[in-house]
Image: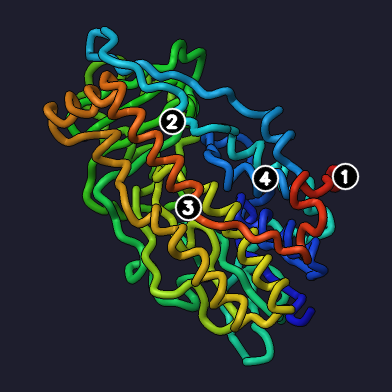
Amino acid sequence: MKNTTVLISGASIAGPALAYWLDRAGCTVTVVEKAPGPRPGGQAVDFKGTTHLTVLERMGILDEVRRRQTGGHDQTVVDASGKALTVIPGEFTGGELEIHRGDLAEILHARTRGCEYVFGDSVTSLTDTGDGVHVTFDRGAPRTFDLVVGADGIHSTVRRLVFGPESDHVRHLGHYYALASLDGPTGDAVMYNEPGRMVAVGGPKATAFFVFASEPLTYDRYSAEEQKSLLLNAYRGGGWRIPEVLAGVHDVYLDSISRVEVEHYSRGRVVLLGDSAYGNTLGGFGTGLAVVGAYVLAGELAAANGDHREAFARYEEKFRPYAKVSKSGNAGPFLAPRTRAGIRARNQLFRTGPLLRSMLWMTDRFATRIDLEDYPDLVGASSSTGAPEAPPSTM
């Protein structure tokens, strides 16, 4: 197979998932990540339907993911006095199989021990020479790779360098979200709304989870202090337990609810994967799309014997219809309706059994709307039982 040296930017979920398959195909894989190491903890992510679970099984990690699953959580919606209004079932927020992002990342890193991980560094330029991609880094020496994959999220550096500024490809959807830790116990999983604001504690996403309506904000995404300040300002004057919750928040991560829209997934020897190509914040399919997309991209590269032009075209042809689910939906107005009438209508949804079951059925249908190929160069005879697990990483 040609084009066997591959740089992947991003070591969260999509990047290590692709590294796993490319390593099996005989590639030499380097993963570069701006963070100083694998990120522990984080919000819960989920998988749903046979397509997601089949890919996990073929990777040989389905049993381990099941062992570490959170089990899902029902969440009670309350009013300002703490009175229960409705219950959001765990199957709605947590899919079929829910796991903390950090635990999933740890599982993937442990099974890509044959790959090179470079933490604490990032790509600064990419030059496609026709025969390869010359890459410069913020800290490391320049290197040349056959192929480069941007698996570095909605704010992808690779996409910006190759496809143009973020403003051309990322559309703000009118809300922001924040994840935070809290001092002391949180109690039961509860959620409270005011027009344009939602706060949840003890729930499936994080110890404290916030969603609020806002026009685009300007801030340093790497400044924890700025993010916490924006969060505190957004919730000033709030009722219920909001002042108490805000007094105890720390380790705040804040970002916009946005949707990625790119005309093509690849350009020359560079290709996008996961949220960098088809992200929709809190859309409910991001992790599944990342893992399935990694399988399809690696499979097409193996099937084309490394011919990136053919493989990238087939990856996009097969995957774009499946990834269309990320082009619809906006979690912001659902989680933090801007009016009291909107809050009441959202709550009513969870009291209406047939409508809720219909939504869950549609979710499962979207999650399975792709025909998975076996890609024998990747999974061989193990496709029906799952690929054998590699020994744990010592990185």
* Amino acid bearing label 3: Arg
Foreground tag (4 vs 2): 4
Q: Which of marks 4 and 2 is nearer the N terminus?
A: 4
Q: Viewed as shown, does residue 264 lie left or right of 353?
A: right
Which circle marks residue 56 in the picture? 4
Relative to 83, residue 151 above or below: below
The answer to whether residue 362 is seen in the rendering is yes
Q: Distance between the residues labelled 4 and 2?
A: 20 Å
Element type at marker 3? loop
Foreground tag (2 vs 3): 3
* Amino acid bearing label 1: Pro
Q: Which of marks 1 and 2 is nearer the N terminus?
A: 2
Task: Give residue 51's position: percent from left, percent from top.
Answer: 57, 47
Q: How far apart are marks 1 and 4 (CA)?
A: 17 Å
Badge 3 density bin: few <14, some 14–19, many ≥20, Cα 10 Å: some
Q: Mark 1 — residue?
A: 391
Q: Which of marks 2 and 3 is nearer the N terminus?
A: 2
